[in-house]
Image (cartoon, rainbow, N blue to C red):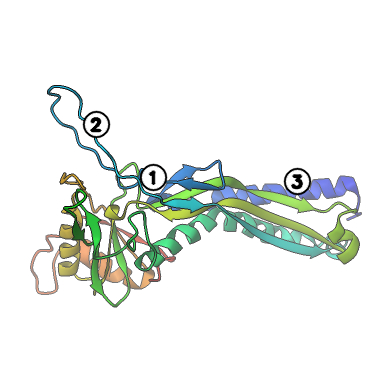
């Protein structure tokens, strides 16, 4: 290909289309477990996390509920993914070989939020959430000031982690904060420093955002062996959670999230008609099994 402004514009248009096509065709999983929150500043504060109100019969004047404010904030970060191609490769009509590389950039951009969201879920055993406790912990403070009790959303154990998630609420267990969409940029002008000094063309993608921990009440973790009994116990504990005002949170443990090595155990727990001894599996169909390769905790 003759290297000139017109031909490079056509090449960039083709590569941009390849990027956008792969971005659109990818199937990320993050939106199943995380709430999308648009951001317009360097960081966003979530003072309202943990604020749970309650209706009462209106007798006399309204009673204003004094809500505890938290100082939980998520700082936006900028992420990039960049590739370089020697000028001679393009000049010798080898650019078609690099189309899959550009498509990979698009797919990577689509799946990068998965890495952020599920990486944070994996780290939930050692990462504080809005109340200052680890997201998965045994002593979350719940109740009115001065009358708080410790509440757990971690069953214990030391094996591979599995999770019960309530994804039916407006707010999901994790927050994905988006400051700027992933964009595709070309550095192919003959006067660009990379072309002039290193004789290479550059294409890259970048975006800005971050993930943060949402309501711990919507997620329950266990590192015990995944059995019908441990699942039933975790489900009962999860769905029994109450808010600071004593009101049941009406948790629905709709999804059982597992890494690939626990897929068989999870399916046996919630899909098998009968247990190993022949008894009816009363837990059958109570949760949807979601296998996620990002889960490694």
Q: CA distance from mark 3 to mark 2?
A: 57 Å
Where is residue 48 drawn, in percent x and y?
36, 43
23 with respect to 279 (left or right): right
Q: Nearer the viewer, residue 54 or 83?
A: 54
Q: Residue furthest left?
A: 279
273 with respect to 5 (left or right): left
Q: Which residue is drawn at the image coordinates 28% and 77% (left, top)?
A: 158
Q: For residue 296, what is the image quadrant? A: bottom left
Crowding at label 3, few (<14), some or many (≥20) Cα neighbours within 10 Å?
Answer: few
Where is residue 223 drawn, in percent x and y?
28, 72
Q: Nearer the viewer, mark 3 or mark 2?
A: 2
Q: Could you say whether the residue bearing mark 2 is in a helix, strand or loop?
A: loop
Q: Which residue is drawn at the image coordinates 65% and 51% (left, top)?
A: 19
Q: Nearer the viewer, residue 235 or 97?
A: 235
Q: Residue furthest bottom?
A: 158
Where is residue 180 drawn, in percent x and y?
59, 45
> Could you tell me which quadrant the C terminus lies in?
bottom left
Q: Nearer the viewer, residue 125 or 113?
A: 125
Q: Which residue is drawn at the image coordinates 71% and 58% (left, top)?
A: 99
> Could you tell me which quadrant the N terminus lies in?
bottom right
Which label is found at residue 64? 2
Pick whichever of labels 3 and 2 is earlier in the sequence. Answer: 3
Q: Nearer the viewer, mark 1 or mark 3?
A: 1
Residue beneath disc 1: 47
180 with respect to 4 (left or right): left
The answer to whether residue 272 of the structure is visible from this angle is no
Residue beneath disc 3: 13
Crowding at label 2, few (<14), some or many (≥20) Cα neighbours within 10 Å?
Answer: few
Pick whichever of labels 1 and 3 is earlier in the sequence. Answer: 3
Pick whichever of labels 2 and 1 is earlier in the sequence. Answer: 1
């Amino acid at each position: 290909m003759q290297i000139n402004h017109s031909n490079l514009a056509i090449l960039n248009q083709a590569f941009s289309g390849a990027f956008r096509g792969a971005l659109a065709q990818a199937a990320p999983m993050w939106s199943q477990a995380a709430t999308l929150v648009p951001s317009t500043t360097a960081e966003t504060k979530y003072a309202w996390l943990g604020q749970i109100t309650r209706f009462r019969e209106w007798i006399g004047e309204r009673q204003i509920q004094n809500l505890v404010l938290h100082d939980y904030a998520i700082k936006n970060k900028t992420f990039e993914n960049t590739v370089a191609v020697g000028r001679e490769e393009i000049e010798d009509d080898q650019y078609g070989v690099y189309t899959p590389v550009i498509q990979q950039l698009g797919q990577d951009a689509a799946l990068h939020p998965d890495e952020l969201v599920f990486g944070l879920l994996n780290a939930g055993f050692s990462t504080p959430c809005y109340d200052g406790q680890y997201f998965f912990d045994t002593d979350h403070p719940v109740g009115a000031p001065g009358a708080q009790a410790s509440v757990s959303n971690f069953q214990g154990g030391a094996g591979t982690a599995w999770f019960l998630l309530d994804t039916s609420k407006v707010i999901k267990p994790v927050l994905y904060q988006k400051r700027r969409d992933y964009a595709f940029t070309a550095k192919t002008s003959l006067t660009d420093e990379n072309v002039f000094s290193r004789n290479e063309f550059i294409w890259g993608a970048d975006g800005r955002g971050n993930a943060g921990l949402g309501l711990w009440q919507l997620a329950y973790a266990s590192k015990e062996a995944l059995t019908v009994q441990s699942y039933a116990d975790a489900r009962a504990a999860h769905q029994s959670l109450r808010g600071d005002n004593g009101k049941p949170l009406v948790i629905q443990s709709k999804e059982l999230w597992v890494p690939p090595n626990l897929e068989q155990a999870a399916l046996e727990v919630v899909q098998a008609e009968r247990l190993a001894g022949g008894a009816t599996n009363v837990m059958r169909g109570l949760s949807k099994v979601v296998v996620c390769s990002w889960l490694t905790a």
